[in-house]
Image (cartoon, rainbow, N blue to C red):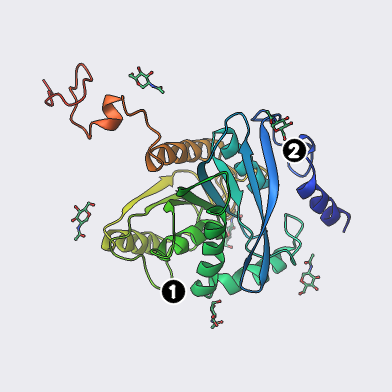
Amino acid sequence: MGRLYLVTLLFLSPLASWAQNDYDYPTLWDPNTIVSSSVDYADGDAKLKGYLAYSNATSGPRPVVIIYPDWDGISNYERFRANLLASMGYAGFVADVYSQSVQQGPSIPVANRSALMMPFRSNSSYWRSRAVAALTTVRTLDIAQKDKIFAIGYCFGGGGVFELARAWPNTPGLLGVGGFHPGPLVTAGPKLQPGSPLRVYAFSGADDPGITGDSVVAWKNEMEAANGTWGFYNYGHTVHAFTIMENPVWNGDKNVSNGYNAASDHASWWALRGILLEAFQLTNTSNAYTSAGGAYDYQTGIAGAKLMSA
Ligand SMILES: *[C@@H]1O[C@H](CO)[C@@H](O)[C@H](O)[C@H]1NC(C)=O
Ligand SMILES: *[C@@H]1O[C@H](CO)[C@@H](O)[C@H](O)[C@H]1NC(C)=O
Ligand SMILES: *[C@@H]1O[C@H](CO)[C@@H](O)[C@H](O)[C@H]1NC(C)=O
Ligand SMILES: *[C@@H]1O[C@H](CO)[C@@H](O)[C@H](O)[C@H]1NC(C)=O
Ligand SMILES: *[C@@H]1O[C@H](CO)[C@@H](O)[C@H](O)[C@H]1NC(C)=O
Ligand SMILES: *[C@@H]1O[C@H](CO)[C@@H](O)[C@H](O)[C@H]1NC(C)=O
């Protein structure tokens, strides 16, 4: 119980003490620039409390990345990702799924996590409503550029962001989603709507025992049927939960389903960063490569010049 109490206090405490508890992450940002707060919102009768972080090194509204937690709910892991995104100039918002009435974090027993998660997994309408509530909430924040929102998630939240994409067109301001070690890939609810403009990306471990070849094919077919913009990143020698640093490094034992893989974690994070630059149109418009739609001179890089492959 002492640990549960500690988690509560950490949620409210300043960032300076944040990195010294629970998971001992190194400082990756200037703590003097990260402003964090909790944001109360609701989905029907459920009272929710999200975590907002942004950098005050810059001012004014900025694009937002929503983070949907894994099955232990909001913990320092998700706040870590929000702070990282804040240090990159975005606003990071950790969505609350389980509600204020649930004590969240790594101390939740595994059996309880399933009990909390399954009602959302088994009812796509219930999940989609809960996920869209976070989206409509961030649009009300002064710090948000209301039409530049991207959503990412981990495990439960990773499969969950695909469900969020499937809620389009009821997804105001959302430009795309990225699911890290997501599960499941497929839905029992309505599939991605044809004509959806959302970018949909999966970052998956090739050795994740929860990701069957059939489900990958079904997911790709669903994306193709919607004629969407999508990508399936498949990281080798990588199992489930490969971005969660406190997991032991996977040793190749096929009986072990979870493990950290630093190379895959970093590669997928940098892939996301590129995807965000493209989705938010933050590339330098003077840059021939990113502005000219491919019509640039191969040798000089001059935009608009006729393609020359010689
Ligand atoms: C930025 O936020 C940090 C953390 O809340 C605070 O210590 C600092 O004084 C703020 N700086 C400015 C310029 O507002
Ligand atoms: C876990 O679930 C059991 C059964 O519902 C409940 O009695 C217990 O209080 C829960 N524990 C925590 C830490 O949430
Ligand atoms: C699924 O969730 C929706 C939205 O919360 C709710 O209206 C519906 O009753 C739920 N269905 C079942 C079978 O629980
Ligand atoms: C599919 O998307 C492409 C590119 O956005 C578009 O040109 C094409 O018309 C779309 N095809 C269908 C069948 O919607
Ligand atoms: C993996 O699990 C299988 C089936 O449960 C078992 O036969 C095998 O010995 C296990 N391998 C290792 C390396 O533990
Ligand atoms: C954008 O690229 C141009 C051409 O390389 C460069 O002159 C300019 O400084 C860049 N702008 C920014 C904001 O980086």
Of mark 2 and mark 1, the one earlier in the sequence is 2
Q: Position of residue 209 (x, y in %)?
A: 50, 58
Residue ID for mark 1: 188
The residue at label 2 has a CB less than 8 Å from ligand 1: yes
Find ligand 4 in the image and state its quadrant. bottom left
* Disc 2 and disc 1 in contact, CB within 8 angstroms: no
| Above or below 197: residue 21 | above
Q: SS of the residue at dot 2?
A: helix
Can residue 247 be seen at all in this image of the molecule? Answer: no
Mark linked to residue 206: none
Location of residue 126 in the rendering, given as x and y in whole percent from the top left corner: 54, 73
Determine the residue positioned at 51% across, 51% down: 152
Q: Residue at coordinates 43% horizontally, 74% vertically from top-left?
A: 189
What residue type is disc 2 on?
Answer: Leu
Q: Which residue is mark 2?
A: 15
Q: Look at 21% across and 24% down and name the residue there.
A: 303
Q: Quadrant of the C terminus?
A: top left
Q: Quadrant of residue 278?
A: top left
If the image is split into quadrants, where does the N terminus sit? Answer: bottom right
Q: Position of residue 192 (x, y in %)?
A: 36, 65
Crowd tier of the residue under label 2, counting other residues whose Cα lies within 10 Å: few below 14, some 14–19, many 20 or above: some
